Image (cartoon, rainbow, N blue to C red):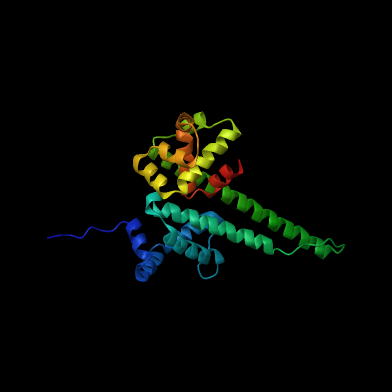
Amino acid sequence: MFFKRKENLEERVERAKKDSDELNKLIKEYRPFIISTVQKKVGRYVKSSQDDEISIGMIAFKEAIDSFDSNKGKFLSFAKQVINLRLIDYYRKEKNKEREVYLDTSEEDNDNKIYEIGTNKAIEIHRLKEENEIRKFEIIEYGKELKKWGIDFNDLVKVSPKSKRLRELYKEISKIIVGNKELLDDLIRTKRLPIKKIQKFKKVHRKKIERGRIYIIALVLIFIGEYEYIKSYIDGR
């Protein structure tokens, strides 16, 4: 007698991209996970029938299914990240909707102003807290990805170029790799920089590329991964 192997979650997610029935099953099955994730992030109990945050979480979960790449880790970790980001977007939009407060001599208006300042401050504090948590999550996930390549953060710190000019060169090389399927496939398959092929796109001495090997690979992993905050930091340097 043969038994059919049970699909893991990542395989179900891949199937759900094309199968609406499986998509609906996943959303229903993982509704408690979505609600729990939202509650942890907003810091309060939420009712699915009343709170916009739950609807945002549901939509974000479906978005995570649509955009998930099984080569980049576990689905639930990725789904948490997407839900967190969408909640932050929501609070940013809500903050922008806050009406502008004008100074007035009336006591009532002053009370309203104090209330709105407090509300804005609370939203800002919440946003910063959420962003810090997502940054921490990204760093942890990025560290795991680096380990797969035999790199740890200490290695990365040691080899990071002090020269801005050299950092920009290595960033350019990493983006050349990401933008070229052949180069990227070679790197992922062999876990080695295809130096000769890189030199066809960028005239750089072989030894200079070799010295930047770890740093270049680390940048490539950032640019092909779901590391929005790390990516914005690198692009801003």
Q: Nearer the viewer, residue 177 or 82?
A: 177
Viewer-proximal residue among 51 and 210 = 210
Query: Which residue sits at x=53%, y=32%?
Result: 160
Seen as rendered, the residue at the extreme left is 1
Where is residue 228? Give x, y as percent.
53, 49
Counting the numbered discs, the total is 0
For the C terminus, the image quarter is top right
One can see residue 73 in this view: no
Taking depth in this image into account, of 163 and 6 the one nearest to the observer is: 163
x, y percent for residue 232: 57, 47
Question: In the rendering, at what x and y percent does residue 68 appear?
Answer: 42, 57
Q: Quadrant of the N terminus?
A: bottom left
Residue furthest to the right: 105
In the rendered image, which quarter is residue 14 located in? Answer: bottom left
Residue 27 appears left or right of 8 = right
x and y, in percent, of residue 167 in the image: 56, 36
- Is residue 59 at least partly visible in the picture? yes
- Residue at 43% x, 52% y is 77
**Which residue is at a point 50% across and 37% down the rendered structure image?**
203
